[in-house]
Amino acid sequence: MHDFEQIARDMAKLPSVADMDMIVNDILEKTLSIVQADAGLLWEYDPDSNQLYCKAYRGIAQEIALSLRLALGEGLIGKTYLRGTPKLYNSMDEIRLDIGDFSAENRGAMKMLFGNEEINSAYLMPIYVNSQIECILIVYRAQGNRPFLPADIETLDVFSGLIEIALANAKGLLALQAQMGNLQKCNSLYATLTNYSVNNSGISSIVDELSGALEAPVAVINRMTNERHPKNAFEDANLLAELAQRNAKNGEAFLVEPEGRAKSYAVYPILAENSCLGYFIVNAEDTESPLKRMLLEVGRMVLAVEFSKAQSRLDISYKRMAQSFSELVSANSPAALSSKSSELGISQKANYAVLIFAFPPDECGEIQESAIYRVIADIRKELGVVQKLTFASQDRIIALLHLQTTDRVGALSRQIDGILSCMLQSEGLPLCAGLGSTYNGPGGIGRSYHEAEKALSYQLTRHNGGLMQYAQMGIHQIFVNLLSDDAESFLHSVLAPLAEKSENLEATLIAYLESGYSLKKTAQSLFIHPNTLYQRLKKIEDCLNISFDNPDDLLKLQLARYLKSYYPDASDGNRP
């Protein structure tokens, strides 16, 4: 018998062999040498076919043995797999009892394999790896050779433990080699993509390289500019709308299934400082392998750097525009105005108007930050050559519009309404806008800017969405910058005395003013008799020490009625 310790040492070296076929063949050869068996077979389970197949064979008619397929529970091998424990057969009669269920095909193959030769002794061992049966090992001695002795079985049982260790180590080594190969591929891709980024090759080059590495089409959507890479990727409006409404703050990938498409897509948000700047999109089926998921993360990491660089470039550009525009608006001499307008490419004879956008103050700051870039992209796309300059300044988006004629404002306002409506419908984000009047030459830009600020302030303080044109504000132009404390103080001084009375005098006064001083209409709206109304009006005059025949008193009351609609609680009796 061979030196058992030497064989154990040889078995310990098996994990250094990367080819599993070589490992199982070595296992068979060493097993046969240990117990001086005539032949041996190593069987594995195939989950796809739900059958056992011969992985390796040592003995005669090897090609026949390797072609065998057994059902679970069929023959010695199938029964050992289900039983999960070793078994010794010491005669052909015992063996025949457990092979009587062979299929006709397998019975014929076994006849070809063994002919008239009979087996004198056979021993089957299930080999476990990580508590799961990895394979079934069978060794046998032909008739004329002595049966396996208890010492042989003891040796084989010990040896099966070495086989388990060898297979476990080999599988672990193969898994490690696969992981190392994956890491090498990821490192290579990272080096290539980083080189593209350093050389400013552009996002399209990165996307092309990723598609090649993944062997699958990928697409990138830039939320700052609404650009797509490739340009024809994902033109489905429903998909883009669903992406826009996602609040992807944690960076976790998610699945989308657009209507009318058989495929689902895995979407990887591209974040920079917790702000979603874009999406990296692949077919969901192309994310199933660990390697592809690792490559996707490498691509997303490089794209995040690329998008962050693009965001920084935009921010720098906006700051420069904002500074130049501020100097233009505040220019206090013709020379300074001419110099700054020339620097910005502003014509001395063209018509200009200023448009300002802002989100309501209660909107989420993180959403605003990423949405501002998209609003600017939409303005430049929808207004085209009309917009001369468009930039962000703190929480405002300012656009200098170049109009050929002053009657262009009507069509322009409809385009602006379209931008506001699109942002609300696609992303659920309300947006306010104020438009100043149109003036000829750069000298009127500052005035239009201040008008646009007032129109925007009117929308924001009254929580109105949409566009307000300064020219359409009417009397609101006078009160747009009135401080709320001043307005409430005025209302309290005028109407507070009425709130202390029990005859609904304040409501009566408001109804009388809104009716245009008509006793009949007022009485009808309050469902009271004209005489009752007349008595209440006299009480109001006495309480407020005013006369409805005095124009100054009427103006004060009408102003109070106007402000009351914006400050409904200002006239209660609790104000100090």
Image: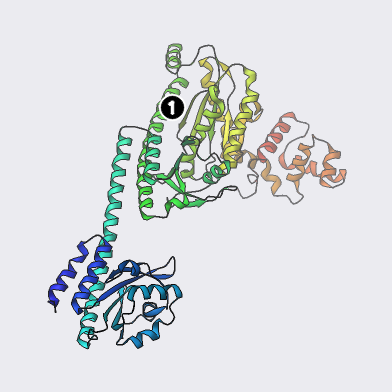
For label 1, the residue is 322
Q: Is residue 214 above or below residue 483?
A: below
- The residue under the point 22% across, 86% down is 146
Tag 1: amino acid: Ala
Q: Is residue 41 above or below residue 514?
A: below
- The residue under the point 74% across, 41% down is 510
- The residue under the point 35% across, 51% down is 294
Left or right placement of residue 92 versus residue 360 in this view: left
* 176 vs 108, nearest the viewer: 108
* 194 vs 208, nearest the viewer: 208
Q: Is residue 273 above or below residue 322?
A: below
* 87 vs 425, nearest the viewer: 87
Q: Residues within 10 Å of mark 1 (few under 14, many from 20)?
A: many
* 160 vs 30, nearest the viewer: 30
Q: Quadrant of the N terminus?
A: bottom left
Q: Is residue 293 above or below residue 372?
A: below
The answer to whether residue 210 is seen in the rendering is yes
Left or right placement of residue 2 versus residue 516 in this view: left
Where residue 496 sits in the image (x, y, percent)?
67, 45
Left or right placement of residue 159 versus residue 320 in this view: left
Where residue 442 sits in the image (x, y, percent)?
51, 16
Where residue 351 sits in the image (x, y, percent)?
56, 16
Residue ranking furthest to the front: 116
The answer to whether residue 430 is seen in the rendering is no
- Asked where in the image residue 531 lies, by quadrant, the reply is top right
